[in-house]
Image (tube, grey):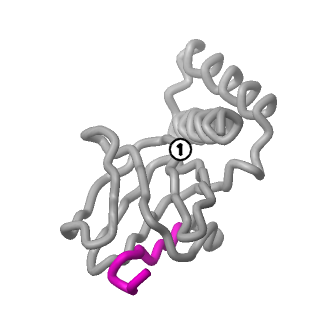
Amino acid sequence: MAEGDVLFVDVVAADRRVWEGEALSVIVRTMEGDIGILPNHEPVLAVLVPSAAEVLTRDGKREVIAVDGGFIAVSDNRVSVLSQYARLAHEISLNEAEHELREAQKLRNEGDNSDATRQHHDRAVAQLAAAKKADSA
């Protein structure tokens, strides 16, 4: 495989680099919908929504990563996913993610619209999506 046939992907959260490496494709959810990135993709800068990003690595392994929003930047076969919170799916418990989402929804239903509750909800949505997607693989 030639260098131009792979993507160099970097997934960064506020507190750490979550994943980096070579990939064949990346799928993320933006405000406009899902977007797939392949080698030699046109430059892109887009806003992400809470979801499960997928990276198909060069060796054919699928990495699923929960992101609570953020940005994706693509240029010259480099993909940067930047999010306040990001976590690999294998680090997430499906039961804990479901519990967190129920708690966040309860707070929202009780009228708590604070930034902290919104952030709690967004992270729970992302974790649940990643845990389910990884579980179905």
Mark 1 surroundings within 10 Å by alpha-carbon count, few (fewer than 14), some (14 through 19), many (20 or more)? many
Q: What amino acid is at disc 1?
A: Ala
Q: Residue at x 38, y 49 (%)?
A: 48
Report helix, strand or loop for mark 1: strand
Residue underneath mark 1: 52
Left or right of 29 on screen, residue 131: right
| 114 in magenta | no
| 6 in magenta | yes
Question: Between residues 42 and 50, which one lies in front from this camera angle?
Answer: 42
- Corner quadrant of residue 1: bottom left
Q: Quick one: which residue is furthest to the front in this view?
A: 1
Left or right of 6 on screen, residue 105: right
- Corner quadrant of residue 59: bottom right
Query: Is 86 rendered above or below residue 109?
Result: below
Q: Which residues are magenta?
A: 1-11
Residue 23 appears in the rendering: yes
The C terminus appears in which quarter of the rendering?
top right
Query: Is 107 rendered above or below residue 25?
Result: above
Left or right of 115 on screen, residue 99: right
Question: Between residues 59 and 122, which one lies in front from this camera angle?
Answer: 59
Q: Residue at x 80, y 39 (%)?
A: 93
